[in-house]
Image (tube, rainbow, N blue to C red):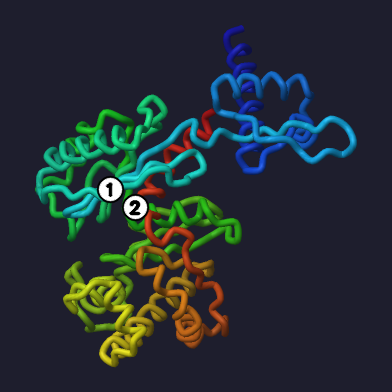
Amino acid sequence: MEKLQQTATERRRLTRNRIYRYLYEAPEGHSKQEIAEHLALSLPTVHQNLSELMQAELVRAGGVQESTGGRRAARLCVAENARFAVGVSVSAQHFRILAANLRLEEIAYRKDAHDPTTDPAALGAQLAAALERFLTDFGLNREKLLGVGIALPGVLNAARDRLLTAPTLPLDSPDLQPLAKAIPYPTVFRNDAACGGYAEWFARTDADSIAYLSLEDGVGGAVLLDGTPYTGANGRSGEFGHICVQPGGLPCRCGRQGCLEAYCSSARISTDLGITVEQFFAGLEAGNLAYRTLWADYLQHLAVGIASIRMVLDCTVVLGGYLAQYLAPHLPELRRLAAARDPFDDTADYIRLCHYPKHAVPLGVALPFIQTFLAEL
């Protein structure tokens, strides 16, 4: 009897979830009649489930439909701000903290400086304090917080509780548990570049599989095949920054030479020149000859990396990270250079620019909590 009751309870949950997901996938909302028709459910079943969802403040009224001659039907929509998740992108000197609602829309953001430290527990204490200030200052209800995702600039183990390597975030212990224990909310750890890819895939409707290439201070990425993250046997899939694009070339922070990261990170056009990224592109637009020469070399090596990714994965390649916001005027040239290295494609229109050039990482690391909520509701 107990098993039968559990089965009936799960059936009711699945029906409720179908109704909620149907509304979730239509931001403009639907009427009860449309829901019943499209999901092949009875109106009483739809009414009962919607009543429960509205009582839980997960569904809201969304206006009325246009009249077809009779009484206009009310539209119902997902209450996107009923819950939220926080994503934190950690670097050696800053926390980028973002709150996202159930549609992965940004509702609050702050960049906080922190004291550099090699102690995971001390880093956790600083993050916990910054997080509490963030929640208080933006008036975010902690009871609606699903969890806190923490994106780190390094390679994690398969269990995602140890940091295997992180050249730009030197910690004296690879164990992430002291950092997690400082946060009084559900917590997950992810690689930062991969997080950008997860957010990008979530936002796209034009590709089932993508390779996401993140161009920031480091170069990394993620692979999503038919919407499923492919992390590899050791959790290192998407480490595109260490594709060799110039044998014996520029030194990379990994200790090798000729890596894509050595040629296409933001450091090459800013830190190495002693200027900001904004100053570089302003000078490039003004016709600075040295900048133009450097940028031509940057695009050449970026094209080599992209062509290699395409040859292996044969899918859309999405360029992200904060350098992506400057790439639109250079996309035709980049596609031309990549196509010249591709025996199967003479346009390279598989190269796309991202939806989230600025905050993809904290959005992406908040996403697991939102996906779990949507799946388990």
Q: Are marks 2 and 1 in contact (CB under 8 Å)?
A: yes
Which of 375 and 366 lies nearest the eye of the viewer? 366
> Which percent across, then down, holds residue 94?
21, 52
The label on residue 103 is: none
**Total marks in image:** 2
> Which percent across, then down, holds residue 96?
28, 50
User: Dot 1 corresponds to which residue?
Assistant: 157
- Mark 2 or mark 1: which comes first in sequence? 1
Which of 52 and 161 lies nearest the eye of the viewer? 52
Residue at x 73%, y 31% (from the top left corner): 74
Whether residue 112 sits left or right of residue 227 in the image: it is: left
Q: Amino acid at mark 1?
A: Asn
Question: How many neighbours does mark 2 have within 10 angstroms: few (below 14), some (14-19), or many (20 or more)?
Answer: some
Residue at x 20%, y 38% (from the top left corner): 179
Q: Amino acid at mark 2?
A: Gly
Q: Label 2 vs label 1: CA separation?
A: 6 Å
Could you say which quadrant of the image residue 127 lies in?
A: top left
> Which percent across, then down, holds residue 126?
16, 40
Residue at x 63%, y 26% (from the top left corner): 16
